[in-house]
Amino acid sequence: MPSRTLFDKIWDMHRVRSMGDGRDLIFVDRHILQETTSAAAFTGLTEAGRPVRRPEMTCATQDHIVSTELRRTASSNPGGRELIELMRRNAAAHRLKLFGLDDARQGIVHVIGPELGLVLPGSVLACGDSHTSTAGGLGALGIGVGTSEVEHVLATQTLVLPRPKTLRMTFGGKPGRGMTAKDIILHALGAFGISAGTGHAIEYAGEAIRDLTIEGRLTVCNMSIEFGGRLGLIAPDEAAFAYVRGRPYAPSDEMLERALSSWRTLYSDADAVFDRELSLDVSLAAPQITWGTTQQEVVGVDEAVPDPTRIADPDRRRRAEEMMQYMGLTPGRPIEGVPVDVVFIGACTNSRLSDLEAAAEIVRGKTVAKNVRALVVPGSTAVKRAAEEKGLDRIFSDAGFEWRSAGCSMCVSINEDIVPPGARCLATSNRNFENRQGPRSRTHLVSPPTAAAAAIAGAVADVRKFA
């Protein structure tokens, strides 16, 4: 058999047949629903008179539009009540497992998938949310789909998709002090740009990737979409297998041993050929922060805001000037020390227990600066519970942070957690578009430790000075 990439192996295992037009019919192992993209899909099913094909392979959670208040109910965010109730009715009608607001397993879809063992190495996971690529941290193909495709999976347990090209992104070197998985992927976005992975399945490789924890790998794969990629994945290893072992929906006993035999074949062959190769040495990079309104406008926290007048290309210069004006930044000034109004630690990129632990280490014994609103929003109810058992909630609350319930929160601004107009927010989420966190909000993407440092300093800060 010809040499194949990791992506090729998983895709070929799930290909039902070729459609003859560059697209393949792919079997979907697990399908996770969230409340904002599933409503219309169920309406389509009902109108067509179709049942859910494999209800045991689909589950649902409520995360995007939910309130993150500590004592929330379905009515806490009135704007989301209809979608929350509709999901409950649809899940009951179609016999789907629902991790709702009153369920101890509720949380952000991309957090609970790995956490519950719904994501397994070599599997195909579909969800009506672009950041389903997060699943790649365990060596799975996480495919984000639109509402019509959600309906298609519900009805057929398959997807019709064009086969992506393959891209290997290799990270060499040992990350320096203060560098996290989030900083590594932001550094790569600054180096390669938001179009680097367009139309590709991205495999992350190299020393810096192998040394990451599983939660760090999930963070890296989460932001594959920010490269324009279709998905991202990392070859599973013994660390990934250990992470999966014992999860509620993962195989056990004899089934686990059989699965492990298969999972250990999931790697790119030594002589596999990728459509594109990129490499980056991360050993000299400083903690990263975005300054513009896409993820590729990024600098080290010890660097200056770029000066657009030094950009030769007129279109790029004009765009940089527009971003600078929107963000309210002064060209050429150090990014460190820029005042901050809001700090948000959470979202599917950085809301796992290890993220909260890293931020708490910076916060411990300190106080949030005056005039800064700081929130910590766990990615799942299980993460919240584990953090409270470790006393992290007290560390944050004593410092002046708001300790919240699990949900997407300030990442997406379709719930009550919104950045005020003109306010500057340091966020651990994955998108910094204009108006992303609220009308005229200004978003800088950073890691949890860098966000925590800014909350204490009241301005952009170099986390390495807090150690």
Image: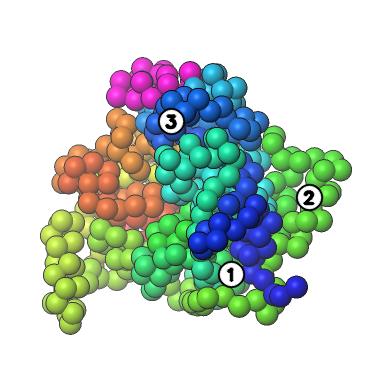
Q: Position of residue 346 (x, y in %)?
A: 42, 43
Q: Bounds of the magenta span? A: 72-89
Figure check: 9 above or below 416:
below
Instruction: Identify the image quadrant of the C terminus.
Output: bottom left
- Disc 3 or 1, which lies upstream in sequence? 3
- Give the distance between the C-alpha atoms of the residues marked 3 and 1, in whole angstroms: 41 Å
Point out the frontmost of discs 1 and 2.
2
C-alpha span from label 1 to label 2: 23 Å
Left or right of 331? Residue 340 is: right
Residue 124 as seen in the image, left or right of residue 320: right
**How many other residues sit within 10 Å of disc 1, few (<14), some (14-19) or many (≥20)?**
some
Farthest-out residue, bottom: 312
The residue that mark 3 highlights is 44
As shown in the figure, which amino acid type bears the numbered disc 2? Ala
Can residue 311 be seen?
yes
Provide the residue designation for mark 1. Answer: 205
Q: Name the residue carrying label 2.
A: 259
Q: Secondary structure at mark 2?
A: helix
Mark 3 surroundings: few (<14), some (14-19) or many (≥20) residues within 10 A: some
Residue 433 picture location, percent across and down: 27, 53
| Callout in the foreground (3, 2) | 3
> Which residue is located at x 54 percent, y 69 percent?
166
